[in-house]
Image: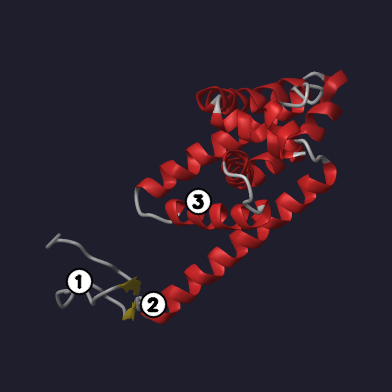
């Protein structure tokens, strides 16, 4: 206020220089302007392109690893997202909320602490790949309904589509969250229903 007084030096950073009346600062005033560099259109496009490329490569890598580990995963996943989408979202939400609580309880109990710590990286990995799992599951569902479509190509196209939706302002964050829940739900269903009988769609695909 008007009666303010600084007995020593004043150092400050701001977008614009402040109006300081004479005699308020007894020492020297050191002002440094904050310069915000605005990105050019080409820089913004390049950032989006790099992000899209990284997302696409990551999804294809997840798809390759899953295909090598289990040839049943994609077909079971397309059922989870095609016929039981709400169930997958519910299971994903349950796993997202309950798993950290279970991990904390296991760690607090000395006898199961090792198990709790071991579950942490597993849970983080599932969260990281969940959006890719959603894209793979959608691709599997489309290929099951339309014969002749190449699954890897459809996975790539769906991955691009999912990335585009998640990149949208405002709704992108919500879409990313629901995509994560779906993918997490699909993963959990595959883990706990690993011995489930092969579905008819898988038999037809063979």
Crowd tier of the residue under label 1, counting other residues whose Cα lies within 10 Å: few below 14, some 14–19, many 20 or above: some
Crowd tier of the residue under label 3, counting other residues whose Cα lies within 10 Å: few below 14, some 14–19, many 20 or above: many
Residue 65: give x, y in percent of width and height. Answer: 79, 50
Dots 3, 1 in contact, CB < 8 A: no
- Which residue is at 27% across, 75% downward? 26
- Say which quadrant the N terminus sits in: bottom left
- Which tag, 2 or 3, sits closer to the chain's start? 2
Q: Which mark is residue 24?
A: 1
* Residue on which disc 3 sits: 162
**Could you say whether the residue bearing mark 3 is in a helix, strand or loop?**
helix
**Measured Cα–Cα span from mark 2 to mark 3:** 25 Å
- Which tag, 3 or 1, sits closer to the chain's start? 1
Viewer-side residue, 144 vs 101: 144
Is residue 50 shown above or below 56?
Answer: below
* Residue on which disc 2 sits: 39
Residue at far left of view: 2
Residue 93: give x, y in percent of width and height. Answer: 55, 27
- Which residue is at 62% across, 39% downward? 144
Residue 55 image-quadrant placement: bottom right
Residue 36 image-quadrant placement: bottom left
**Measured Cα–Cα span from mark 1 to mark 2:** 38 Å
Mark 3 vs mark 1: give the one in front: 3
- Say which quadrant the C terminus sits in: top right
Crowd tier of the residue under label 2, counting other residues whose Cα lies within 10 Å: few below 14, some 14–19, many 20 or above: few
Is residue 35 shown above or below 185?
Answer: below
């Amino acid at each position: 206020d008007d009666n303010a007084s600084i007995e020593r030096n004043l150092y400050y950073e701001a977008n614009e220089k402040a109006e300081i009346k004479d005699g308020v600062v007894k020492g020297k005033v050191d002002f440094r302007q904050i310069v915000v560099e605005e990105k050019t259109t080409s820089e913004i496009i390049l950032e989006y392109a790099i992000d899209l490329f990284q997302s696409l490569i990551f999804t294809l890598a997840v798809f390759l690893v899953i295909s090598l580990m289990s040839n049943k995963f994609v077909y079971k996943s397309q059922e989870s997202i095609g016929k039981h989408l709400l169930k997958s979202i519910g299971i994903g939400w349950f796993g997202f909320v309950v798993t950290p609580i279970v991990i904390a309880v296991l760690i607090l109990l000395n006898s199961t602490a090792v198990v709790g710590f071991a579950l942490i990286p597993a849970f983080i990995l599932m969260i990281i790949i969940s959006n890719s799992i959603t894209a793979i599951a959608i691709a599997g569902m489309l290929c099951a309904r339309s014969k002749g479509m190449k699954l890897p190509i459809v996975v790539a196209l769906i991955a691009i589509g999912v990335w585009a939706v998640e990149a949208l302002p405002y709704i992108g964050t919500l879409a990313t969250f629901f995509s994560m829940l779906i993918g997490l739900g699909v993963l959990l269903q595959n883990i706990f229903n690993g011995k489930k009988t092969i579905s008819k769609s898988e038999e037809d695909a063979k």
